[in-house]
């Protein structure tokens, strides 16, 4: 396979990136921003996490303007960390960019080499094989699951663990497998609940949630985004009930609240419907 012809980066993109890096350098330089000057890699790490979550929120809302803005915040955060690192850690934006570029080329032998692949699934398997070989050369943990950060939110971590295991061939052939597992874990949770064993209930509930995440993976539905959407809809409907009930919720009957809830739900599916105050 011939090496692909790479297109030049548009001049306006290069100018925009250069200007952003100039601004970040100014903020970190003497006479710049006191807050930015005192930051460290460690102090900036939580901000990167926060910006990533804000980007995920924007994606879940489907708000392109917000996605663009949050991408900018995240990009700024990454470049700021690289700029801070340049002051005392022996690397900066140059090394970061060169490192990830080399990694992308190395892990895409079907694009930059002679490897032939049959679909995205084989691409992922090759990626994991190459990654595992890199870890072996560096003397690191070679487990397929070693690259999943423990600090990830549990739902996202479960999704990534399932993906990693699948790339190694440890997976059901289709969605019927995890669907059956969901039913099995639900039955086990009910049994644990009936026994009154709180530790077993916690364990079986975790198993059920993990099974649901695996089902989502086989259905190609991102569980984090799916759950975010559900929470958003719940909040909208709940606010609708609050606004329309005409009295404190504690004084309303469940039947009254359910009727308004159904009204709010119907408005979501009716193109002409509109939730009051949302």
Image (tube, grey):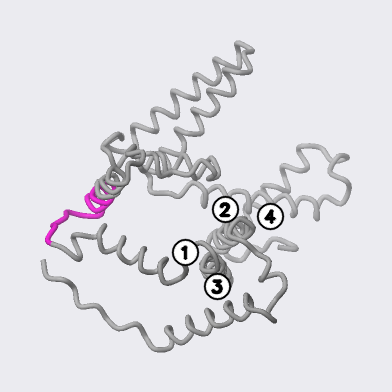
Please give the residue where the numbered disc 1 appears in the rendered image.
90
- Note whether 245 is above or below 213 in the view shown: below
Q: Who's the residue at 34% across and 37% down the image?
A: 143
Residue underneath mark 4: 236
- Contact between marks 2 and 4 (CB within 8 A): the answer is no
The answer to whether marks 3 and 2 mark residues whose Cβ atoms lie closer than 8 Å is no
Tell me which secondary structure the magenta stretch mostly adopts. Answer: helix
Q: Mark 2 to mark 4: distance in Å? A: 11 Å
Q: Where's residue 87, x and y in %?
A: 55, 68
Q: In the rendered structure, which segment of residues is drawn in magenta?
A: 114-128
Q: Going by the image, does 136 lie left or right of 30?
A: left
Secondary structure of residue under mark 3: helix
Helix, strand or loop for disc 1? loop
Q: Earlier in the sequence, mark 2 or mark 4?
A: 2
Tell me the CA gap for discs 1 and 2: 42 Å
Residue 193 picture location, percent across and down: 60, 17
* Mark 1 or mark 2, earlier in chain: 1
Marks 1,2: beta carbons within 8 A: no
The reply to whether the magenta stretch includes residue 136 is no
Label 3 to label 2: alpha-carbon separation = 23 Å
Mark 1 or 2: the one toward you: 1
State the residue position of label 2: 229
Nearest to N terminus: mark 4 or mark 3: 3
Q: CA distance from mark 4 to mark 1?
A: 49 Å
Q: Residues within 10 Å of mark 3 (few under 14, many from 20)?
A: some
- Residue located beneath label 3 in the image: 72
Q: Is residue 126 magenta?
A: yes
Labelled pair 4, 3 in contact (Cβ < 8 Å): no
Q: Residue at x 36, y 63 (%)?
A: 100
**In what element is the residue under mark 4?**
helix
Q: Are marks 1 and 3 in contact (CB under 8 Å)?
A: no
């Amino acid at each position: 396979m011939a090496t692909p012809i790479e297109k030049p980066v548009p001049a306006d993109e290069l100018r925009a990136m250069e200007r952003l890096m100039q601004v970040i350098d100014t903020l970190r330089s003497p006479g710049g921003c006191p807050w930015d000057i005192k930051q460290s890699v460690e102090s900036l790490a939580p901000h990167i996490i926060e910006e990533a979550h804000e980007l995920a929120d924007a994606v879940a809302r489907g708000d392109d303007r917000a996605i663009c803005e949050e991408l900018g915040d995240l990009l700024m955060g990454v470049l700021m960390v690289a700029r801070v690192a340049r002051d005392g850690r022996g690397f900066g934006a140059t090394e970061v960019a060169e490192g990830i570029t080399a990694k992308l080329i190395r892990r895409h032998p079907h694009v930059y080499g002679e490897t032939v692949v049959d679909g995205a699934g084989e691409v992922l398997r090759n990626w994991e094989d190459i990654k595992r070989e890199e870890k072996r050369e560096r003397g690191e943990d070679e487990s397929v699951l070693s690259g999943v950060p423990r600090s990830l939110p549990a739902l996202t971590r479960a999704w990534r663990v399932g993906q990693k295991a699948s790339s190694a061939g440890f997976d059901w052939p289709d969605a019927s497998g995890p669907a059956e597992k969901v039913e099995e874990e639900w039955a086990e949770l009910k049994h644990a609940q009936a026994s009154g064993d709180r530790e077993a209930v916690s364990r079986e509930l975790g198993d059920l949630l993990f099974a649901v995440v695996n089902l989502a993976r086989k259905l190609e539905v991102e569980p984090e985004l799916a759950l975010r959407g559900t929470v958003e809809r719940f909040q909208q409907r709940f606010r609708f009930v609050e606004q329309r009930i005409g009295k404190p919720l504690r004084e309303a009957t469940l039947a009254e609240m359910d009727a308004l809830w159904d009204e709010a739900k119907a408005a979501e599916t009716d193109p002409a419907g509109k939730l009051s105050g949302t």
